[in-house]
Image (cartoon, rainbow, N blue to C red):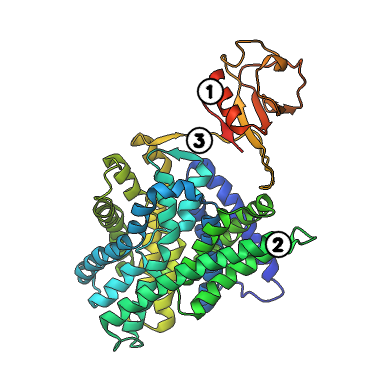
């Protein structure tokens, strides 16, 4: 075993990151969730090479990573996309989490004695509460890396739910830990409900206001070094979490809402900020999953009571608790088909969040804390293996998937520019009046800036011959007129960049 010191910390860290990235490439090729491989790499190194069992450091790394993941998830979510699914998304993220915890908690309380473990209903409910939310890191990374489109607004719904349901699970976990550790034993049910309402309300208001403050500051500070905008936004992320927690609000909800606000307002250097946080989010996800893999004790996972309870809980969550919750929560929303409800039930992935929440009982010294952590860890692996590897396959099987085309031109413009930037593909209708660029009837103040043909890019001239399948990058000051022109030309698919 290697005991990490300051001399070899950087070397070991570099090795872990390199192996994790290679494992992620392998995972993508074989259709497995990359985060599962990151977890496996950490477990492999923890078995034979590295000794690591710091609960406090694991919680700290998890907190930092969750802040970045939730903020980036909110920042990448367009409000126009989630507006049609706000109702069902909020219901799943709040009532759905509570229902999942109650259903799973009752099952654990009933089945635990059959595997040789006696636990109170409160402890069983605590185990269920840690697992009650879907994991935003897993859902975001799998849905976006696959670039798979989903009908019936399912992708925005799943991302909204996974990005906003962690606060509910966090509050339930903290309240139950407090009850079991006698920190809140005399508070009573009504005091717990009041605490929950206050935390969610304060978190929502704080997140919105800090998000607006971040937008206002970034747009007006005028930094000469553009790289510092990323540092400034990082400061706002951690401030949103810490300040909200200080005033007794829910920091995770505040971070997600702040990201949602920042991502849906005009922002200086928005393109560079998005690129930075996409890469940084992958880094913190890798570090978080590696840390959790290092932290777990493999020998404890194969103990009979852990193995049996973990597998049974994981299976019940996938096939009973999650589907029952989803069908009940979505019952008032008639626009979702049965196939869509089945798919939402299936993409209830568990990941790093339940494992991190399962460390809270360890810190508080709650009864059966070690057992709870190991069961949650094993059930999470079951979820990632069974559900994570079949996200795309299930969508295709249910007939809900469509090919999501990536733009050929990775360009961006300042929000201050009024011109519209679009991408179209040349078809037979476009070439009806001629095959040269000058023969294409475009509005005034409109220019074809670049053509992509068979993966090669070039700047066209009026005499340039157009071919079927060419991708055209078009800029125009006449956005509405250009849209009508596209319709007249028979261009159905227009990408707005």
| Residue 321, numbered label | none
User: Quick one: quadrant of the C terminus?
Assistant: top right
Question: For this view, does 417 lie left or right of residue 189?
Answer: right
Question: Which numbered disc flags the more N-terminal residue, 3 or 1?
Answer: 3
Of helix, strand and loop, which one carries label 2? helix
| Residue 487, numbered label | 1
In the displayed structure, would residue 52 be above or below residue 316?
A: below
Question: Which numbered disc flags the more N-terminal residue, 1 or 2?
Answer: 2
Quarter of the view holding residue 170: bottom left
Question: Which numbered disc flags the more N-terminal residue, 2 or 3?
Answer: 2
Are the residues at dot 3 and dot 1 in contact (C-beta closer than 8 Å)? no
User: Quick one: quadrant of the N terminus?
Assistant: bottom right
Q: Which residue corresponds to mark 3?
A: 404
| Residue 220, numbered label | 2
Q: How crowded is mark 1: few (under 14 residues within 10 Å), some or many (20 or more)?
A: few
Of helix, strand and loop, which one carries label 3? loop
Question: For this view, does 400 lie left or right of residue 330?
Answer: right
């Amino acid at each position: 075993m290697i005991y990490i010191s300051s001399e070899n910390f950087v070397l070991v860290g570099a090795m872990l990151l390199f192996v994790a990235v290679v494992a992620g490439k392998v995972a993508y090729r074989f259709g497995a969730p990359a985060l599962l491989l990151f977890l496996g790499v950490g477990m492999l190194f923890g078995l034979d090479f590295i000794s690591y069992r710091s609960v406090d450091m694991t919680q700290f790394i998890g907190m930092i990573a969750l802040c970045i993941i939730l903020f980036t998830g909110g920042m990448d979510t367009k409000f126009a996309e989630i507006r049609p699914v706000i109702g069902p998304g909020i219901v799943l993220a709040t009532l759905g989490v509570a229902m999942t915890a109650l259903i799973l908690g009752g099952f654990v309380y009933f089945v635990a004695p059959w595997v040789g473990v006696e636990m109170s209903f409160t402890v069983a409910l605590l185990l269920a509460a840690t697992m009650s939310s879907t994991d935003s890191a897993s859902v975001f990374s799998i849905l976006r890396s696959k670039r798979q489109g989903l009908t019936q607004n399912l992708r925005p719904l799943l991302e909204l739910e996974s990005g906003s349901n962690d606060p509910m699970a966090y509050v339930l976990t903290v309240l139950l830990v407090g009850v079991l550790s006698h920190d809140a034993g005399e508070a009573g049910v009504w005091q717990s409900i009041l605490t929950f309402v206050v935390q969610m309300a304060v978190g929502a208001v704080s997140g919105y206001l800090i998000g607006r403050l971040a937008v206002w500051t970034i747009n007006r500070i005028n930094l000469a070094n553009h790289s510092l905008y990323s540092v400034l936004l990082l400061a706002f992320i951690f401030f949103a979490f810490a300040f909200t927690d200080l005033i007794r609000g829910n920091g995770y909800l505040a971070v997600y809402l702040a990201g949602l606000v920042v991502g849906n307002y005009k922002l200086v250097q928005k393109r560079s900020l998005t690129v930075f946080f996409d890469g940084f989010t992958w880094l913190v996800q890798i570090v978080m999953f590696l840390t959790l893999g290092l932290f777990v004790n493999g020998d404890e996972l194969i103990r009979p009571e852990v193995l049996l309870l973990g597998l049974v809980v994981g299976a019940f969550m996938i096939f009973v608790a999650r589907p029952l919750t989803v069908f009940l929560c979505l019952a008032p929303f008639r626009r979702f088909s049965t196939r869509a409800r089945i798919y939402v039930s299936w993409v209830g992935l568990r990941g790093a969040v339940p494992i991190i929440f399962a460390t809270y009982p360890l810190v508080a010294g709650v009864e059966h804390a070690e057992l709870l952590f190991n069961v949650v860890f094993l059930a999470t692996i079951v979820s990632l293996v069974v559900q994570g590897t079949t996200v795309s396959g299930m969508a295709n099987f249910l007939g809900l998937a469509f090919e999501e085309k990536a733009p050929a031109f990775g360009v961006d413009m300042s929000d201050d520019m009024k011109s519209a930037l679009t991408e179209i593909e040349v078809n037979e209708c476009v070439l009806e009046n001629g095959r040269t660029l000058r023969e294409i009837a475009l509005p005034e103040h409109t220019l074809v800036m670049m053509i992509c043909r068979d993966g090669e890019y070039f700047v066209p001239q009026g005499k340039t011959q157009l071919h079927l399948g060419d991708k055209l990058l078009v800029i125009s000051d006449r956005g509405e007129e250009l849209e009508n022109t596209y319709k007249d030309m028979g261009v159905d698919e227009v990408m707005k960049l």
